[in-house]
Amino acid sequence: MAKKDGKKRGSKPAGKRGSKPGGKSAGKSGGTSVPSVSDLLRVPAGTVDLAGLRTKPGPGPKDEAAARNEIASIAERLSELQERLYAQGRAGGSRRLLLVCQGMDTSGKGGVMRHVVGLMDPQGCAITAFKAPTKEELAHDFLWRIRLRLPGPGMVGVFDRSHYEDVLVVRVRELAPRPVVSRRYATINRFEQRLVDSGTTVVKVMLHLSAAEQRRRLLDRLDDPSKHWKYNPRDVDERALWQPYREAYEIALEKCNTPAAPWYVVPSDAKWYRDWAITRLLVEHLEAMDLGWPAATFDVAAERARVESS
Ligand code: AMP
Ligand code: MG
């Protein structure tokens, strides 16, 4: 007898812990020859040299049209996986996903929100943009405001900037004593390990932009009145600190690149490649969670009979 389960909505046991994302599952998520974007973009263990990591498009779609096509073709998969996660959360499951986005000004964090996170059901997503801390936030430890914004069960939490600012801008601008900053890497690793242990898949992406591309984007914002709202004169002050930021990123990427919560460096000079890569990363991580639909908590046949006779 033919199975009733469609290929899309086939059920798997809920609540099963997933494996690491990898080549195994990548075939389901798109049409390019890249085996796994997780493998491709994952930062190798050890010292990080950002100059050695590409900012320009790499393996994968060759141009914008191909990338947008592929994004469109995997959007449905992404959306279904997110719905499974959300459904599990509603049914008492504990799993969730946290996407952490870091990058220099103009690197495209806002674009990722619109073009990638925007592919998912807004009911299941919670985006937080972290700005300079308020007085109240500063009165607490640096993870306080982060904890308040962690995704609940079934949710996809998205951080536009994050606790990493406390080892990036805070380090570069010397907003806290160096020994305090130095202790934070281990604190972050313990914090993220606990998140993972309690059912959160943590996906950390650094949007890797070249200085030349940032310059182009800043000029573009100045030349187009519809982009003036995005331009912040202070961005030019931060740009002047490109090298210290580079170093701060390299240290954070090295020290907080744990097996539980690894870093991915996403080439971001081309917006289409950035969007394609992060869409794939999300699909791969959600697939590795092996999410099934929650089982009915009622007698389906009996309910069907009741509805039919109603
Ligand atoms: P934007 O993301 O461009 O809207 O800018 C937000 C600003 O808030 C950036 O300049 C960040 O560096 C700054 N910011 C975010 N988190 C922190 C933090 N923990 N300490 C100091 N500044 C921060
Ligand atoms: Mg900015």
Image: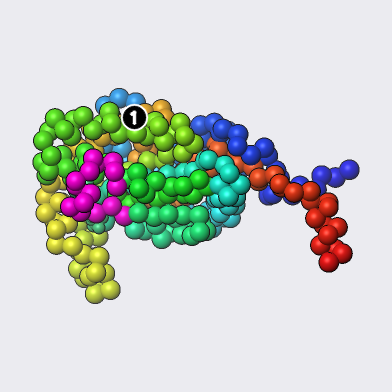
The residue lying toward the viewer, choosing from 82 and 282, is: 82
Q: How is the rendered protein coloured?
A: rainbow
Left-right relation of 204 to 252:
right
x, y (%) of residue 195?
41, 36
x, y (%) of residue 31?
57, 47
Quarter holding the C terminus is bottom right
Q: Is residue 97 magenta?
A: no
Mark 1 surroundings within 10 Å by alpha-carbon count, few (fewer than 14), some (14 through 19), many (20 or more):
few
Q: Quadrant of residue 116?
A: bottom left
Residue at disc 1, secondary structure: helix
The residue lying toward the viewer, choosing from 224 and 281, is: 281
Q: Which residue is mark 1?
A: 190
Task: For residue 109, say whether it is visible.
Answer: no
The answer to whether the beta carbon of the residue marked 1 is less than 8 Å from any atom of ligand 1 is no
Task: For residue 184, say whether it is visible.
Answer: yes
Left-right relation of 239 to 130:
left
Q: Residue at coordinates 14% horizontally, 62% vertically from top-left?
A: 233
The residue lying toward the viewer, choosing from 191 and 35, is: 191
Q: Quadrant of residue 220?
A: bottom left
Q: Residue at coordinates 56% horizontally, 32% vertically from top-left?
A: 17
Residue that lies at the very extreme toward the bottom in this rendered image: 225
x, y (%) of residue 200?
46, 39
Does 120 appear above or below 282? Answer: below
Question: What is the span of residues highlighted in magenta in the rendered image?
Answer: 129-145
Does 257 appear above or below 140? Answer: above
Left-right relation of 295 to 159:
right
Three-letter residue code for mark 1: Arg
Q: Residue at coordinates 64% horizontally, 42% vertically from top-left?
A: 292
Q: Residue at coordinates 33% horizontally, 30% vertically from top-left?
A: 189
Quarter holding the N terminus is top right
